[in-house]
């Protein structure tokens, strides 16, 4: 479903955000990036990041120790 | 592709970076790169000991000396280092190595990585002319992306910025 998947597992703040920003730049408006992270802080951070940048946070879920975010590029 | 409203809403931040040890290098680079990722226009002004962070060859040091809040996680607990031990020969560099290993193990970015991200995200990087003169640094020892400026250059940016930090 996602147009691109970014594996940010094992990375700590602020790397998941920085990598996601880079990945979003490579997408076109309306495309979806899926980010997989293990940093618990990324839950609040991706919400803030999307809120500020206008990219839409379609979903924020977790499976075990993995946090999954789906972001639609603005 | 000029989006007038977006331009009007654009936020900006400036950071004065005054410290160049391994631990103190993190806050400015983390905040700067994250802000840039959030579409904030960022200026970083490196002065005094902060200027070493712009050397082409980074060899950042870390010392537990004079830092009673530094506790290293160790064998399930935490260990602080009394000054008396921290000043023994070799202990400082051992602590630095320990810190670098810890950073790697925890998936924390290296300063080199964050600096690269800062450059990639078009953060304006200004090196302080007076500090270059004072500590006798050569332009060619510093990264190419460094612009040179003084207090007035910083002030011009700071006066227009939404956030100004001194670290």
Image (cartoon, coloured by chain):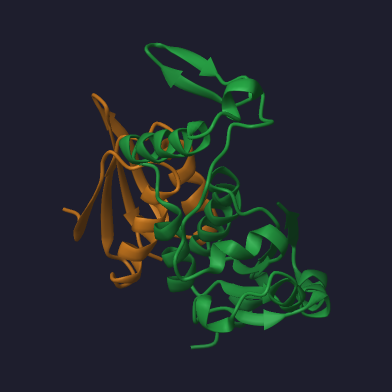
**Residue B49 drawn at (x, y percent):** 67, 58
Q: Quadrant of the C terminus of chain A?
A: bottom left
**Residue B24 drawn at (x, y percent):** 60, 46
The relative height of residue B44 versus residue A10 in the rendered view (above or below) is: below
* Residue B107 appears in the figure: yes
The relative height of residue A39 versus residue B11 in the rendered view (above or below) is: above
**Residue A58 drawn at (x, y percent):** 35, 48
**Residue B87 drawn at (x, y percent):** 60, 30
Q: Is residue B77 left or right of residue B156?
A: left
Q: Nearer the viewer, residue B130 or B1?
A: B130
Q: Quadrant of residue A32?
A: bottom left
> For the point 51% across and 60% down, which residue is it?
B33
Q: Quadrant of residue B106?
A: top left
The relative height of residue B7 versus residue B29 in the rendered view (above or below) is: below
Residue at the limit of the structure toward the front, as seen here: B89
The relative height of residue B49 versus residue A29 in the rendered view (above or below) is: above
* Colour representing chain B: green
Residue at the limit of the structure toward the bottom, as seen here: B1
Q: Nearer the viewer, residue B90 or A4?
A: B90
Q: Is residue B83 left or right of residue A55?
A: right
Q: Is residue A1 left or right of residue B30?
A: left
> For the point 83% across and 71% down, which residue is it?
B159
Q: Nearer the viewer, residue B84 or A49?
A: B84
Tally of numbered discs? 0
Residue at the limit of the structure toward the left, as seen here: A1
* Colour representing chain A: orange
> For the point 40% across and 49% down, which residue is it?
B109
């Amino acid at each position: 479903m996602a147009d691109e998947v970014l594996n940010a597992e094992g990375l700590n703040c602020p790397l998941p955000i920085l990598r996601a920003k880079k990945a979003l730049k490579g997408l076109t408006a309306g495309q979806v990036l899926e980010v997989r992270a293990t940093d618990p802080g990324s839950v609040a951070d991706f919400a803030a990041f999307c809120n500020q940048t206008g990219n839409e946070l379609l979903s924020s879920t977790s499976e075990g120790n993995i946090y999954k975010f789906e972001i639609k590029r603005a | 592709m000029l989006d007038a409203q977006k331009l009007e809403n654009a936020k900006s931040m400036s950071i004065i970076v005054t410290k160049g040890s391994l631990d103190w290098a993190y806050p400015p680079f983390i905040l700067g790169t994250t802000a840039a990722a959030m579409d904030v226009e960022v200026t970083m002004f490196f002065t005094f000991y902060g200027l070493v962070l712009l050397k082409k060859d980074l060899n950042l040091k870390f010392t537990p000396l004079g830092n009673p809040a530094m506790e290293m996680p160790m064998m399930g607990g935490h260990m602080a280092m009394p000054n008396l031990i921290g000043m023994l020969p070799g202990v400082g560099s051992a602590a630095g190595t320990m810190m670098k290993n810890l950073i790697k193990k925890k998936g924390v970015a290296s300063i080199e990585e964050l600096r690269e991200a800062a450059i990639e995200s078009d953060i304006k990087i200004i090196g302080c002319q007076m500090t270059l003169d004072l500590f006798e640094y050569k332009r060619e020892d510093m990264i190419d992306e460094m612009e040179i400026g003084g207090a007035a250059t910083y002030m011009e940016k700071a006066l227009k910025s939404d956030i100004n930090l001194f670290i």
